Amino acid sequence: MRQLKEDTITSNLIESQQSAYGPVCVYQNKEYRWLTLAQKTNEDITIQGVMNLTHPEQVIVPVNQCMMLFLLKPVDTLNILNLGLGTAGFERIMYHLQSSTPYINTINTFNTVEINPNIALIAAQHFKLPIKHRSYLQCAEQYITQCSDHFNVITIDIFSGEYHQPFLTSDSFWQNINRCSKQNTQVIINLNPQTGQELQMLLVLLRQHFKCLAIIEFNEYKNIVIILSQQTLMHINVDEIQNSPVFINFAPNLYKSINSIYHIE
């Protein structure tokens, strides 16, 4: 990621749009294409997603690889809700696993919610978002409030630059997430808490709505991933990740990138 930040220069810029949420820029070098949502100094660049040009199905960043950890347990039929489209990396890998591997049998429902229409357009034009995929252009909070479907996987990856949407600390938001969940649902969140106090307050809130939490910290990333469920998550551990066929094939070094996994049950 450090190299990509150094390569985030005008000569590598292939698309730039001014959206209602700030500038959206796409860059490309010989190996990768990536998206940024803010363009100030190099230190302020936030890379929102990366695609390997040769193997677009690859999930490159360990934080994003952890959004797939629900695959540690076999699920016959997936009903997926993804809040936050970004560069459509999650969508690409899910469809690839379904069509080209034995790891996913059936995807019955797969909805993505994205508030920024420029992101949705760029994902289709530059990041191979499948044409058949169902995307909803609205605020995630609004979608989940009105939602009447039930999902067994809900992924939440919602940033504006480095900051989260404020509704992630809303009690009603998590009530609605639970309402749209099944008993065995796993909710997986990519977080970048700015302070320890912010993280602690969020964990207290999440514990009120979910019986089991798994908190994943990384060696080289400030982000953490939190997995939530009403059923035990003790199977989410480094040994299981290291020995899982799907992760051996698609994220073989993920277990090395994880600093620690904490469980609250």
Image: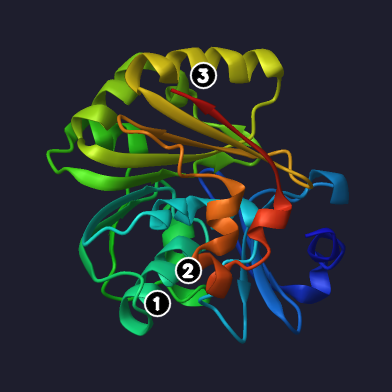
Q: CA distance from mark 1 to mark 2?
A: 12 Å
Count of marks overlaid on the render: 3
Above/below status of 33 relative to 184: below
Could you tell whether 39 is left or right of 73 in the image? right
Determine whether 165 is above or below 120 in the image.
above
Residue 200 is situated, as x and y percent measured from the top left of the image, at 59, 15
Which secondary structure lies at badge 3?
helix
**Residue positioned 46% across, 56% down in the render:** 68
Of the image marks 3 and 2, the number of the one nearer the N terminus: 3
Which labelled disc corresponds to residue 146? none
Query: Which residue bears the numbered disc 2?
Result: 246
Q: Could you tell me which secondary element the residue under label 2 belongs to? A: helix
Mark 1 vs 2, N-terminal side:
1
**In-front residue for pair 258/144:** 258
Pointer 1: what residue?
96
Amino acid carrying label 2: it is: Val
Q: Of the numbered discs in the image, which one, if any, rests on residue 203?
A: 3
**Position of the C terminus by quadrant:** top left
Q: Position of residue 137 (x, y in %)?
A: 32, 50
Q: Residues within 10 Å of mark 2 (few under 14, many from 20)?
A: many
> Considering depth in this image, is 3 or 96 the residue closer to the camera?
96
Q: Would you identify the image quadrant in which residue 93 lies?
A: bottom left
